[in-house]
Image (cartoon, helix red, strand yellow):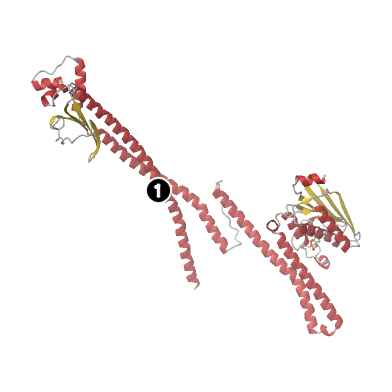
């Protein structure tokens, strides 16, 4: 049965591992897709721009050829024929046709004719001349020339996609310069071999380059994402370990990075520390409480057993046992009330965020109450340095509770000299209240411990006085809950001074009124 659950568990863990690793894969694929898309957009953009540029160059070239031919051929007044066209293109051609020598002495004509000859001998460009009946009268094309289609305007330019790439066809109607008659057509076909080759090279290089970049980026992304996923993986592994053994002292190794992951690791460790301290505190609290309750319960149980066995017949013993049990029951009641107070004192911020106390009136009221309850004590209240209308951010019942705890202790632990001095003064930014007694005092090594829960200097004697060792813990929690401070100065045999301090409520108008 146990083996089965174990098997189930490992399966579950495997599933979880699968899920985790798929997150890395997901990230890498998202990054790869993003990079690919961006690269493709970028490459296509650049490619289209270059293509546009090269086409424009070819267009310019073809149009220049067309206009060069047009200028020469416009001089012909009649329909194009091989015999009137060829001499216009080159005197050399004419001479070759007529069987004459090929030299011409006119330089100007030579330059012009040379450019036409150069065009005619260019492999990329073929020039075809048609008569108005669209019959070919001249061509330098080595392949068959297509039939001329009807032209919508005098100048037509077509970019054609062929099996070999792009091709640019330019058509021009030629009108005689003299009589304005349509004498023929010029068709210039540019196969753009060079351009197609350049574009193909760019395409291939861009694909190869993009593939290389995508692979490199994917590798980098994998490395980066893995380095991010590693601490997260460690955190979840540790969380699982702590889940099994909440007392484990294991922590995440400190990361050298200062980014969010470093912060996450630090705060995770801090959270574990706090959580475990809280668990320890809770355990200690339960232990302390059960220990504290054990004595009164044992006392009541002892009395009841005694009465059960023989005591109930003796009215004196019966009365004594009832009194003792009642006293213990009262003590338990008091203890439970104090434990509740302590728990509440730990949640002040949430429950009383905006309460304000008037220090003067709370102090006066509390001192007067104590005077009434303990008429045998001389309670001196010195408020000479307390400005009127001194206010602090605190629920007034809590201020009263702290004062009662301190004055009650002062009375409880006083000896022969039954005198208590309560002093209050308003400082620049704080209000200070001290409660002084002239009783037994507290040894230096005990002074910090008395604020711990259930700590009593002399257990037996304090118990007699009805103390549970919770009063000062409650007072400390309350004071610190309102951002105040509590401290003690004491000398064994001479007495103690407990001092509390709170930040003044910042309200200009109130301060001015009191001055
Ligand atoms: P308790 O309810 O037992 O008085 P406290 O938390 O108020 O618990 O006090 C803790 C211990 O500190 C007391 O048991 C006592 O020993 C010591 N103590 C507190 N106040 C005084 C005081 N004014 N003079 C001497 N000892 C004091």
Within-10-Å neighbours for mark 1: few <14, some 14–19, many 20+:
some
Q: Is residue 440 left or right of residue 37?
A: right
- What is the x, y in percent for residue 433? 82, 52
Quarter of the image where the C terminus is located: top right
- Residue depicted at x 75% and y 66%: 337
Q: Residue furthest left?
A: 99
Secondary structure, mark 1, is helix
Q: Quadrant of residue 79?
A: top left
Instruction: Give the camera-side residue of 79 and 385.
Output: 79
Badge 1 is on which residue? 33
Instruction: Give the camera-side residue of 394 and 194.
Output: 394
Q: Quadrant of residue 165?
A: top left
- Residue depicted at x 26% and y 28%: 61
Instruction: Give the camera-side residue of 193 and 272.
Output: 193
Relative to 382, say whether 136 is above or below.
above
Q: Quadrant of residue 192?
A: top left
Q: Is residue 343 left or right of residue 201?
A: right
- What is the x, y in percent for residue 184? 16, 28
- Residue depicted at x 80% and y 78%: 303
């Amino acid at each position: 049965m146990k083996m089965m659950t174990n098997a189930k568990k490992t399966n579950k863990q495997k599933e979880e591992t699968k899920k985790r690793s798929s997150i890395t894969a997901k990230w890498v694929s998202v990054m790869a897709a993003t990079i690919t898309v961006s690269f493709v957009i970028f490459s296509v953009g650049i490619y289209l721009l270059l293509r546009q540029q090269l086409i424009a160059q070819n267009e310019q070239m073809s149009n220049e050829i067309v206009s060069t031919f047009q200028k020469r051929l416009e001089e012909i007044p009649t329909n194009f024929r091989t015999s009137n066209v060829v001499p216009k293109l080159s005197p050399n051609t004419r001479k070759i046709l007529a069987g004459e020598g090929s030299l011409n002495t006119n330089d100007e004509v030579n330059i012009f004719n040379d450019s036409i000859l150069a065009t005619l001998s260019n492999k990329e460009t073929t020039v075809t001349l048609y008569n108005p009946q669209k019959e070919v009268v001249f061509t330098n094309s080595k392949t068959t020339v297509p039939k001329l289609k009807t032209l919508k305007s005098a100048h037509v330019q077509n970019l054609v996609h062929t099996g070999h790439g792009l091709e640019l066809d330019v058509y021009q109607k030629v009108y005689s310069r003299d009589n304005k008659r349509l004498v023929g057509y010029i068709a210039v076909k540019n196969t753009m071999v060079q351009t197609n080759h350049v574009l193909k090279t760019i395409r291939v290089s861009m694909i190869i380059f993009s593939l290389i970049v995508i692979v490199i980026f994917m590798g980098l992304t994998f490395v980066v994402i893995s380095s991010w996923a590693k601490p997260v993986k460690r955190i979840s592994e540790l969380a699982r370990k702590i889940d099994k053994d909440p007392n484990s002292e294991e922590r995440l190794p400190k990361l050298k990075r200062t980014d969010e992951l470093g912060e996450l690791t630090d705060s995770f460790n801090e959270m574990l520390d706090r959580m475990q301290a809280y668990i320890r505190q809770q355990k200690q609290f339960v232990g302390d409480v059960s220990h504290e309750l054990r004595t009164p319960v044992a006392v009541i149980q002892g009395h009841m057993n005694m009465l059960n066995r023989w005591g109930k017949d003796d009215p004196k013993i019966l009365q004594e046992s009832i009194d003792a049990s009642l006293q213990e029951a009262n003590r338990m009641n008091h203890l439970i009330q104090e434990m509740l107070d302590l728990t509440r004192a730990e949640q002040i911020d949430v429950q009383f965020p905006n309460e304000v106390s008037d220090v003067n009136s709370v102090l006066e009221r509390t001192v007067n109450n104590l005077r009434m309850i303990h008429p045998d004590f001389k309670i001196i209240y010195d408020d000479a340095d307390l400005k009127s209308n001194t206010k602090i951010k605190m629920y007034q019942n809590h201020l009263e509770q702290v004062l009662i705890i301190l004055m009650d202790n002062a009375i409880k632990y006083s000896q022969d000299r039954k005198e208590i001095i309560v002093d209050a003064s308003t400082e620049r930014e704080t209000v200070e209240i001290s409660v002084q007694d002239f009783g037994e005092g507290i040894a230096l090594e005990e002074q910090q411990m008395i604020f711990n829960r259930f700590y009593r200097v002399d257990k037996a004697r304090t118990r007699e006085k009805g103390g549970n060792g919770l009063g000062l813990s409650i007072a400390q929690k309350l004071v610190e809950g309102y951002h105040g401070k509590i401290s003690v100065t004491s000398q064994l045999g001479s007495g103690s001074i407990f001092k509390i301090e709170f930040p003044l409520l910042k309200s200009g108008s109130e301060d001015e009124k009191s001055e």
